[in-house]
Amino acid sequence: MYYSDYNRPPEEREPVIETDQYHVYEAQPPRKKGGKAKIVAIALCCALVGGLVGGGGVLTYNHFAGSRSTIYQGNTPTVAVDMASVDGSTVLTPEQIYAANVGAVVGVNGDKTTNAWGYTVRNAVSGSGFVISSNATTSYILTNYHVIDGVSDITVFFADGTSYDATLVGGEEENDIAVLQVEAGNLQTVTLGDSDALNVGQEVYAIGNPLGELTFTFTGGYVSAKDRSVTMSDGTVMNMLQTDTAINSGNSGGPLFNEYGQVIGIVSAKLSSSSSSEASVEGLGFAIPINDVRDMVVSIMEHGYVTGKPNVGVLLDDVSQEAQRYGVPAGAEIMAILEGSGADNGGLQVGDIITAVDDTQVDSVSALQDAVDGYQAGDSVTFTVYRDGSETTVTVTLDEDNQARQEAMDQLQQDYYEQQQSQSQQQQQQGGNSFFWPFGW
């Protein structure tokens, strides 16, 4: 039937077959062609119909009077997922990786936060995490520091619907890791793998809670790159694995698995476009290599903080470009010194500009920090400093950056802030410039 017959003059139309509701015009029979072509067409038609019917069941229903339409419905057998164990040598299917690990993944929620004025407000924070250790009474969960930063009343929930109140054992903001503890024993745990053994192009998978609502979502992709230096929103530079695995807000703190079902990374960040006029950025996710933080996590579980981290006991700021134009070398200028610290005992002075750590030249605060991070608390380090127009060296024994030291440095920074604020107000009244905020370390 050709519906184009409606556009032809009535005298040229073919005879009409009338139904209760529609007029359907019959097309003029096509001119006969060779029999061989007809046989081929019938054979193709039969092959098509045979293939469709062979794929599953057939459903039919009446459309118009005297006509029938057919829907072909396939039958797919239900496949049971083999609960394979994570042994580090057996490559698992994606289904097996999910089934073997989803019971160890959690959602992390905080019901209250403290705002900048010290008031407690309702502001749920959603993220992910995973159980890394569990004994008869207590279990430990690893997540990102930024997931729980400033949050109280932390709750973790599992895929089976159970939930537990969690307490913060400790965290390491610089490396964006935090360990939570729940009073529940014999929970399922993940198995940690070797992130250094990864190859670009290797398949990886994530389980997490994107958008805080699509809980226990499973996504997959590839290792896109290794050893990416990624600058976070707070300016911290971190070493990261890059992956095109789908990652969104709420995935932070969740596990990234290799093809053996082992955790080789902590999902931490996603690169996004900051301008609404630009196309959104897709397929650029980042995870913290598990080898980079494994020892830190153990230290937090045992001591509540990362032991052995060095601290000099100074507030620092980069030498300005203006000062460098007048012959002052690039480096890290000391703005304040903590009394009784290694810097104080070693003889460093306010105004010193540190230009080298042992044999490593440094031209900024970040370069100085990177150089000293290679040492342990208790090590002796020789600083080359620019003082009163000439160079000298000072040997400093590094302190441990524990909780007490962090609190002392916070107080030193606050005291410095108040002092500079007072001076700034006086300078502004006299037409001077405002103060700056140094880096404590």
Image (cartoon, grey):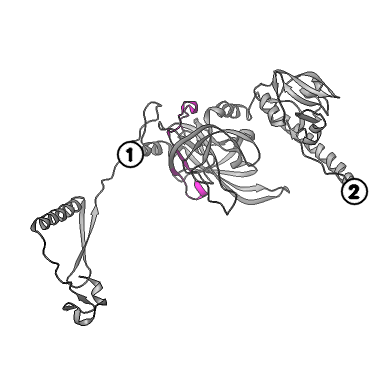
Q: Is residue 48 left or right of residue 368?
A: left
Identify which residue, 120 or 331, lies in the foreground: 331
Observer able to see residue 105: yes
Residue 91 falls within the magenta-colored stretch: no
Left-right relation of 403 to 61: right
Q: Which residue is mark 1?
A: 81
When the figure is inspected, residue 351 is found, relative to residue 209, above or below; the finding is above
Task: Give the residue type at disc 1.
Answer: Val
Q: What residue is shown at x 20% (from left), y 75% (from top)?
A: 25
What's drawn in magenta, residue-wise? 190-218
Q: Residue at x 59, y 51 (%)?
A: 275
Measuring from the top left, give residue 430's x and y in whole percent. Answer: 91, 46
In the displayed orientation, state which residue is furthest to the bottom: 11
**Nearer to me, 106 or 380:** 380
Q: Is residue 170 visible?
A: no
Q: Indicate whether residue 201 is drawn in magenta.
A: yes
| Structural crowding at the residue carrying mark 2, measured as other residues with C-alpha within 10 Å and reported as few (<14), some (14–19) or many (≥20) | few
Q: Quadrant of the N terminus?
A: bottom left
